[in-house]
Image (cartoon, grey):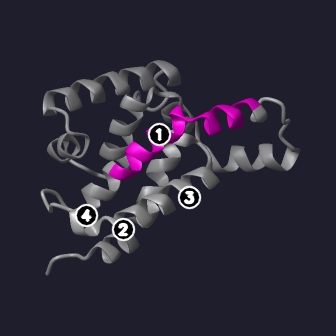
């Protein structure tokens, strides 16, 4: 039985939110991006060529839309405004509770390394699957994965990798 687009959206919505968040680092914007991706996917369903699964299609659209946002003036304004707002004690406590050292280190990686780590470790995609999703050679996926691990090890001082 082949999955419909609506089923794929329902099944993978949370994963798409996490993926968008790894790029934009803002929950509300990640939700907006995924909502936009879902709407556009439904609008353009007739043009879907079925060369890949709906899941892969939605992931690629989410990554592209996240990059579009990061290049936008709206993002630059948001970053500027955030630099003027101090966190409340409640916000600081919430951040400490919800973000681990590893999560923070991953978010500090460049997007090309962050996306590989998220897809490989958090979404359990294989190297060939990541290669297909990102439309890059498998060798490039392996190289980026290795470099991302090295950067994480350096940032965390071996905390995670020494175990």
Confirm or deny contact between disc 4 and disc 1 (CB under 8 A): no
Provide residue 60's location: percent of width, then percent of height: 31, 49
Closest to the observer, 44 or 33? 44
- Verify whether residue 74 appears in magenta: yes
**129 in relation to 37, above or below:** above
Between circles 2 and 4, the one closer to the viewer is 2
Secondary structure of the residue carrying numbered label 1: helix
Q: Which residue is mark 1?
A: 68
Mark 2 packing: few (<14 Cα in 10 Å), some, or many (20+)?
few
Q: Which mark is residue 43?
A: 2
**79 in relation to 46, above or below:** above
Q: Earlier in the sequence, mark 3 or mark 2?
A: 3
| Residue at the outermost bottom position | 1
Label 2, label 1: how far apart the Cα atoms are: 19 Å
Label 4, label 1: how far apart the Cα atoms are: 21 Å
Q: Earlier in the sequence, mark 3 or mark 4?
A: 3
Closest to the observer, 27 or 50? 50
Residues in magenta?
Answer: 61-80
């Amino acid at each position: 039985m082949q999955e419909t687009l609506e089923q794929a959206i329902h099944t993978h919505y949370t994963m798409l939110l996490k993926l968008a968040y790894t790029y934009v680092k803002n929950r509300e914007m990640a939700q907006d991006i995924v909502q936009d991706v879902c709407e556009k996917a439904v609008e353009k369903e007739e043009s879907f060529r079925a060369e890949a699964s709906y899941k892969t299609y939605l992931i690629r659209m989410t990554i592209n839309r996240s990059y579009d946002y990061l290049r936008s003036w709206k993002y630059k304004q948001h970053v500027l405004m955030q630099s003027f707002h101090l966190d409340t004690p409640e916000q600081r406590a919430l951040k400490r509770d919800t973000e681990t050292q590893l999560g923070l280190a991953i978010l500090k990686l460049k997007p090309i390394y962050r996306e590989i780590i998220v897809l490989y470790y958090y979404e359990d995609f294989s190297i060939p699957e990541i290669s297909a999703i990102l439309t890059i050679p498998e060798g490039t996926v392996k190289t980026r994965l290795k470099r991302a691990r090295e950067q994480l090890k350096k940032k965390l001082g071996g905390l995670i990798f020494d175990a």
